[in-house]
Amino acid sequence: MLSEGALVQRLSDLVGADHVVAGPGASPYVVDGKLARAVVFPGSVEEVSAIMTFASAEGLKVVPWGSGTKMALGGIPERVDLVVVLSRLNGVVDYEPADMTATFRAGSLLKEAQAILGRNGQFIGLDPPHTDLATLGGILATNSSGPRRLRYGASRDLVIAIRVAHADGKVTKGGAKVVKNVTGYDMNKLYIGSLGTLGIIVEATFRLHPRPAVEKTCLALLDSIDAVRGVVARILDSPLVPFAVELLNQEASRRVAEQAGLPWPKERYGLAVAIGSIRPEAVDAQLETVRRLCREAGSAEGSVLDGRVHDAFWRATRDFALGDGLQAVLKASVLLAKVADAVRVGEDVAAKQGLRLGVVSEAGSGIVRYHLAGETASDERFRQGVAEAVNRLRAFAQEAEGNVVVLKAPPELKSRVDVWGLAEKALALMRRPKAEFDPQRILNPGRFVGGI
Amino acid sequence: MDKERIAKVLIGIVSSDGVVTDPGELQVYEADGLTVFKATPEIVVLPRSAEQVAEVVKVCQRERIPFVARGAGTGLSGGALPVEGGILIGLNRMNRILEIDYANQRAVVEPGLVNVWLTNALAPGGYYYSPDPASQTACSIGGNVAENSGGPRTPKYGVTTNHVLGLEVVLPNGEIVNLGGRTLDPLGYDFTGIFVGSEGTFGIATKVIVRIMRKPEAVKTLMGVFETIEDASNTVSGIVARGIIPVAIEMMDNNSIQAVEKGVAAGYPLDAVAVLLVEVDGPKDEVEALVGPIIEVCKENHVREVRLAKDENERLLLWKGRKAAFAAMGQISPEYYVQDSVIPRTKLPSIMKFIGELSQKYGLRVANVFHAGDGNLHPLILYNSANDGELRKAEEMGAEIIKACVEMGGSLTGEHGIGLEKRDFMPLMFTEDDLGAMRKVKRVFDPDGLVNPGKIFPAATPGGEVGPTVQREALDTVLGRALAEGVQPAHGGDHAL
């Protein structure tokens, strides 16, 4: 194995000494407590490729890194030799507003991409957590999504072309810069959500959407989860076309309201239904229907959010986090009709385990996020509680034909529960792309499903 | 293959009424919708269940017999073309709707189900299945999955892959596996996503879980009549620039209008250079709000006449013309050869001009009827194979169109697939390394290369050597030149994607 000095020297030869860090300077680049031997900041696709060729030759284990907002996702890595940070690989590659497609380098911040596109009234229909820091590459690698997926879909629906640097240094593309294309296999799908285990995404082309000129949200207060269940079902089975239907439990409602500067009575579920259009009268007509449905479900009058408050509310919702202290975040994907039950199961188990629970759910998409905190509990008690919650929710999700992923947890917890929970029988096929694309297992080994 | 012995084994699996060996009956299966390619399978098997498919596939695996799955055979790229000496697995008998689950907005269907039957079955509940290829009254959902089929509604609602959430698949080793499921974000790699559009080269889908959608409250369809293709094209861009995403934006040129009017009399003006069909849907107030701006954009672009369908009958009539366009070509030409390439929308005027010039050069008429909203062209090159050399000229012209589209930053095919027809064009878009990555995925599912061999990958490269021998000189003329010259967008520069 290369000495640290030799490793830094070789990397410096590839990207320049200014773009390699080791020793104390590398200390922020920790994955589940494992410190990188060296951190490298490539400035071009060619440099990423050269780094991968080098890593392959030396058998170095590589962790791709955007802004590091989702490094808690995944199993504990087997080893971390090299962290490849893509922050220098940023900016727009090409953008033709009239075609409504744009290509960005993977290290670009979503926020910056949206600012560029916003000048033409366009945007990428993604609003995942970490509004200020999430990079496009990180969002795609982790298939991160937010409330807007109800209308705009997730990364798999929005990426039309992709460029990837593979373990052997080869750079390949998939898809094309047109919104409709079936030429060859749809390689975009393979890399999205693969957590960097098949290659490093270096560029991506998105289909864009026009940003609705008017967006407003009806925020209703509901007393019980059964009331929530009823009103969500009616909205989804109506001709309304909301771009988001978000459910917040009491804890989440309170914190989001606080951050967005909204008055909020305690002990209510919050149901936010967002409507957008090019015309205000079209938005208002739909909102009126939403308010009626909420009233009929027994909601105290829903308030309408618009302008700055609207934006602040949605930002607080997608970036939701409990305060400091011991934390874990779980994400369940369940059938639409099971969302309310999924919330209730989470509440039960959190109460039994003495954990504080904030629930933020894309109720129209069947996604439920559980933020668990245990500031009063001991570390061990917290770990036990979360592990129990994972087991309980998995048992439930299985019946609802879904799954539960641990998005964030301390490493001590990860050694106790499988963060993915994919059944053994599905794993044989899952291992095969890895064997084809990265037979040496140098990319993010140990972090993906089944320890891939 | 020892035909008699294998047939006996297969009869043991699906019984005698599910095995076809009679040469006359086999002819039915010798081509898909692209009839210039023909190959006769040794045996056709018609299973009724996933288990039967798996047993048949195991026989193929054990005996090393290449096999091809076929739905309704409406494909337009030779994707379901059988392999000489191989087995064809017809899925028409697996055509049930297994479950409709309104509460969760899902349906589970078998692959042989005819596309429109699903929407028909959902109608009483107020729901529908969005992907609606022009062949929807005949094509199967399994075929749609293989091709990642589109249709007119894709600008707003996307293509098949956006509506398929899970699959039950028989792998080439006979194993039955579930990919994805009813819920979003399944764990691990997105196998459902990569399987959709794999053109039957990974395995055979035996169950398809799709998203079903609530019918919109209102739909408005309008026709714009234009004096130039450019005005019509600019209208398309103008509508989108207003922030409006119509369900569909379809364009037809004068040759198409002539054919359609002779065929079904949809009421398109015979002297129009181009007509646009624009459809918007959604809540009533939303739809009302969109019609005005669309008409404004049409006027800004010198529209001669705008006709807003007054009622459902008028709307269906406008669509009838569009949907019947391919079939109506018989009114003005004995045969046609259709291309399916895609360009960035802003290149519409230039590519239409180029196609016009090619038409002059080759002395062949072209009827354009296509999905303008997403830049997906369908130039129908009209020819008569009774005239010596015309088919070859048509193919050569098609190849020139494809090459031009790729040079404009587009792609070879938007919804018809590569199949056998366009496999040799793949190097125009993809480097050997790009194709190498695709081959790795092929090996994930089909390490022995038994299912639908000879499709997608170029004949002269690994994966392409198997399969029927077909006459390719016409395309070679153009393609050989194109490959020799190189196509800049596919290979040049750091930023080429």
Image (tube, coloured by chain):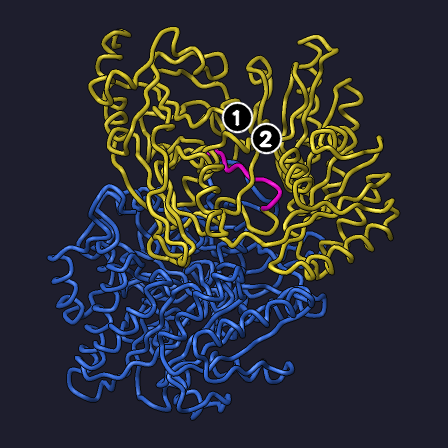
Chain colours: A yellow, B blue
In percent of width and height, residue B269 lies at: 45, 90
Estimate how packed mark 2 is, as few (under 14), some (14 to 19) or many (20 or more) residues with alpha carbons within 10 Å. Answer: many
- Residue A449 is left or right of residue A324, and the answer is left
In percent of width and height, residue B187 lies at: 53, 36
Chain under callout 1: A
Residue A132 lies, with reference to residue A173, above or below; the image says: above
Of labels 2 and 1, earlier in sequence is 1
Instruction: Name the quadrant containing residue B121.
Output: bottom right
Chain under callout 2: A
Q: Are marks 2 and 1 on the same chain?
A: yes
In percent of width and height, residue B253 lies at: 37, 81
Residue under label 2: A405
Element carrying mark 2: strand
Element carrying mark 1: loop
Q: Magenta segment: does it hold A145?
A: yes
Amino acid of disc 2:
Val
Q: CA distance from mark 2 to mark 1?
A: 9 Å
